[in-house]
Amino acid sequence: MTLRGRDLIADWIETALLVRGARPIGLDALHGFFERHQGLEPQRVNIGIREMDRRSRLLGSRYPFKIHGEFAVQATVAAPSSSYATIALMAPGSPVREFLSASPDETMAVIFENATADALTHLWGDQGKALRFGWPSDIGRPPEFDLAIRWLAERIGVEVGRGYRQPRRKDGGVDVVAWRPFADGRSGFPVLLVQCTLQDNLLAKGMDIDTRLWSSWLAMDVDPATALATPAALPPGTTWNELALKYMVMDRVRLVSLADPLVTDELAHDWVVQTIEDLREHMEEIGEL
């Protein structure tokens, strides 16, 4: 795989740091590795390092890595348990996809959707709420779409709409729902419908959420907003601009900025630990940097 773009270069450096644990990596060694295996000149690698600086400035203590002099290093011993590491390891173009041939599966999808729901709980402050609507569900959502909509309406606090709910549907394109109720219990509060994706070509990802249909399934006085969540850390540029014209973009940096810094989800924690261990067996040269 040939790395393209500063975001992917930064992702590979971050993964190398997770694999190495507490041991730092010299920048000269990084330059040599990327030149041998990716044909990247040092100035291209430096672009990835500057992307890491950008992420660090935006996330502060939530970013578990740092560039310290001539070395890249984990900023905290809890890095593998961080929300950042959990989401980063699922990103398209990451070494997980390259070395482990780990195509997105149900486990990865559930972990990312749960991470997205946990982050978006904080979107509107302490009173915000969010849940994973995707199927299969571990929080009691019925499998039948009609019953699932009734279940969701009860939790959000709205009436069920009169629109026809096709029984063959699974989730209507919505993986996570976030909302902010008010103390008066009345209608007219913000609702966000979120589609989560682990695929790499975001521009080709059609938004499967039809707000007209959803407004007929849930009796809301205010039309819901929509968002696309991705584990990629999207740098500024044309891709971001084009996506943002369609919906709210929740990339890795935005999700981590909202999430609890450390992961408490046992499924996610076990997956991260096992993934890093598997990577150690496939990234021997990185382990020897």
Image: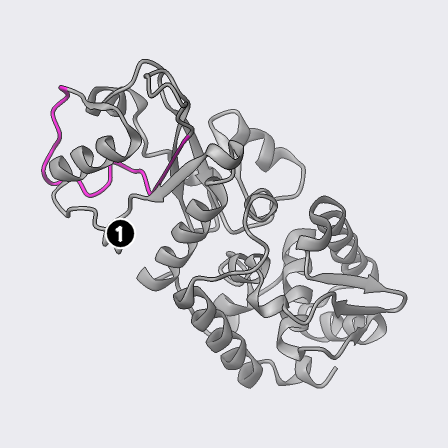
Query: Is 74 colored magenta in this rendering?
Result: no
- 46 with respect to 225 (left or right): right
Can you say whether 1 is above or below 278 in the image? above
Residue type at mark 1 is: Ile
Quadrant, the C terminus: bottom right
Disc 1 marks which residue?
A: 139
In the image, what residue occupies the spot 39% across and 61% down? 108
Q: Quadrant of residue 104?
A: bottom left
Q: Nearer the viewer, residue 79 or 173?
A: 79
- 227 with respect to 83 (left or right): left
- Horizontal and vertical percent position of residue 27: 83, 70
Instruction: Give the main secondary structure of the magenta stretch.
Output: loop
Start-end of magenta stretch: 162-179
- Horizontal and vertical percent position of residue 36: 72, 75
Quadrant, the N terminus: bottom right
- 253 with respect to 120 (left or right): right
In the image, what residue occupies the spot 35% across and 18% down? 223
